[in-house]
């Protein structure tokens, strides 16, 4: 595997760079940079400062303008910063040009996410998926990223035995990608057989933005111990448990979280993991209602579900972390009836918008979990009735 695990070392200090342009407002860029800071923290880096600039479009050579890059360089040198992270994807030549000016390691959002995935991958499937995504990310950046390729060109001493050095490197990477795809196909076949072997059980999948509490809910609903942590992408591998509510069995799966600007290489590489979502009968869309941009996160998840053709399934939206929402929303002096009115308006709004297919809970505080179980049970039994109308043992 590519040595991406060394992209970020513990205690590295980083600055973040974003760009306001025709497709990204200043408010959006600030939100993206806040999320990028959380990603950096997850990878073990401390964010010291943000930089952003308004341009009609990214500079083709250095992404930001010359003056802004020099400003970043001066700050980086004065503060001893050893890492600069750009919020948008950079080309190999842009990384090379930026590092010439800044003289510190420079990565982009995709590279950072790949680094986190490489650290979190535990199973053979996840490790292969990450490695494939890394090589796919690297392939178009070979010429700009590898300094030893700069001596290519015409003249004596630069011609190789049949192909140039960069062509050799591209061929090696392409062969590695082909090998990893074949390996992943074999793993996918095994996973498909395992899914088929699960019998006639209705399958329910937890989906949602990363760090919304899916794994915690999985533990509460299935009474199992699934790794849960307040960091992005705590779960990469799909975990499936058999759950029984009131004598009705079903399979519950926890899946990888979605995120804005998720590298398309990762989406492609993780399509076997996303098959768990595609092949589910019911989706539980978990939302962190306490997050300032939770509505945007709902949009990202819905868009991703549409992209993978899984948006037409029955969906129950679970607004999680209601305890945190109340702490952030309610002041001590607020009257109880006013608090109740605020909560009523929130719930009515979403119940109307989602046609009643939503529940408001706190997984950590076990708030409203019985109501959630009832909602899930109703959907599961309804699905059994449709699929197996003559097997009453499934839904009574």
Image: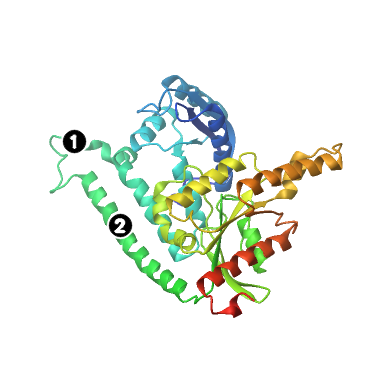
Q: Residues within 10 Å of mark 2 (few under 14, many from 20)?
A: some
Q: Which is nearer the eye, 228 or 4?
A: 228
Pinpoint residue 213: horizontal percent, then vertical percent: 63, 54
Who's the residue at 34% across and 40% down the image?
Answer: 145
Task: Say which of 382 and 4 sits in front.
Answer: 382
Q: Residue at x 39, y 53 (%)?
A: 268
Q: Residues within 10 Å of mark 1 (few under 14, many from 20)?
A: few
Could you tell me which secondary element the residue under label 2 belongs to? helix
Q: Which residue is mark 2?
A: 176
For image coordinates 31% across by 46% down, the residue present is 139
Residue 150 shows in this picture: yes
- Circle 1: element type: loop
Q: Nearer the viewer, residue 193 or 14?
A: 193
User: Could you tell me residue 163's position as x and y percent?
Assistant: 16, 47
Question: Which quadrant: the N terminus?
Answer: bottom left
Ranked by sequence position, the earlier of labels 1 and 2 is 1
Left or right of 60, for residue 393: right
Figure quadrant of residue 235 = bottom right
Vertical placement of residue 176 versus 49, above or below: below
Q: Is there a contact, CB below 8 Å, between mark 1 and mark 2?
A: no
Q: Position of residue 318 (x, y in %)?
A: 64, 54
Residue 202 in percent (x, y) is at 54, 70
Numbered tag placed on residue 372 in the rendering: none
Whole-number angstrom distance, CA of label 1 to CA of label 2: 26 Å
């Amino acid at each position: 595997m590519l040595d991406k695990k060394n992209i970020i070392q513990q205690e590295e200090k980083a600055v973040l760079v974003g760009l306001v342009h025709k497709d990204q407002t200043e408010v959006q860029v600030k939100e993206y940079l806040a999320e990028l800071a959380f990603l950096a923290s997850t990878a073990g880096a401390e964010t010291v400062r943000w930089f952003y600039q308004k341009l009609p479009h990214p500079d083709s050579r250095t992404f930001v303008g010359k003056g802004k890059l020099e400003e970043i360089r001066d700050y980086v040198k004065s503060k001893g910063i050893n890492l600069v992270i750009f919020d948008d994807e950079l080309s190999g030549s842009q990384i090379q040009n930026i590092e010439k000016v800044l003289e510190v390691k420079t990565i982009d959002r995709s590279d950072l996410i790949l680094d986190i995935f490489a650290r979190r991958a535990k199973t053979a499937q996840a490790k292969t998926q990450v490695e494939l995504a890394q090589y796919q990310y690297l392939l178009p950046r070979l010429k700009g990223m590898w300094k030893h390729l700069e001596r290519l060109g015409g003249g004596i001493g630069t011609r190789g035995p049949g192909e140039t050095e960069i062509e050799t490197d591209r061929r090696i990477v392409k062969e590695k990608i082909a090998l990893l795809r074949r390996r992943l196909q074999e793993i996918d076949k095994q996973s498909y057989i395992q899914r088929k072997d699960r019998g006639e059980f209705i399958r329910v999948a937890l989906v949602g933005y990363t760090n919304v509490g899916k794994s915690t809910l999985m533990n509460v609903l299935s009474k199992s111990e699934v790794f849960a942590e307040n960091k992005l992408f705590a779960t990469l591998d799909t975990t499936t448990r058999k759950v029984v509510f009131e004598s009705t069995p079903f399979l519950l799966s926890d899946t990888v979280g979605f995120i804005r600007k998720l590298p398309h290489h990762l989406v492609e590489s993780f399509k076997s993991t996303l098959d768990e979502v595609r092949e589910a009968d019911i989706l539980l869309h978990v939302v962190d209602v306490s997050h300032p941009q939770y509505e945007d996160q709902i949009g990202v998840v819905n868009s991703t579900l549409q992209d993978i053709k899984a948006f037409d399934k029955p969906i129950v939206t679970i607004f999680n972390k209601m305890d945190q929402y109340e702490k952030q929303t309610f002041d001590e002096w607020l009257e109880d009836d006013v608090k109740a009115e605020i909560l009523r308006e929130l719930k009515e709004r979403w119940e109307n918008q989602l046609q009643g297919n939503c529940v408001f809970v706190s997984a950590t505080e076990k708030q409203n979990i019985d109501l959630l179980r009832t909602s899930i049970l109703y959907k599961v039994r309804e699905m059994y009735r449709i699929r197996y109308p003559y097997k009453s043992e499934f839904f009574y």
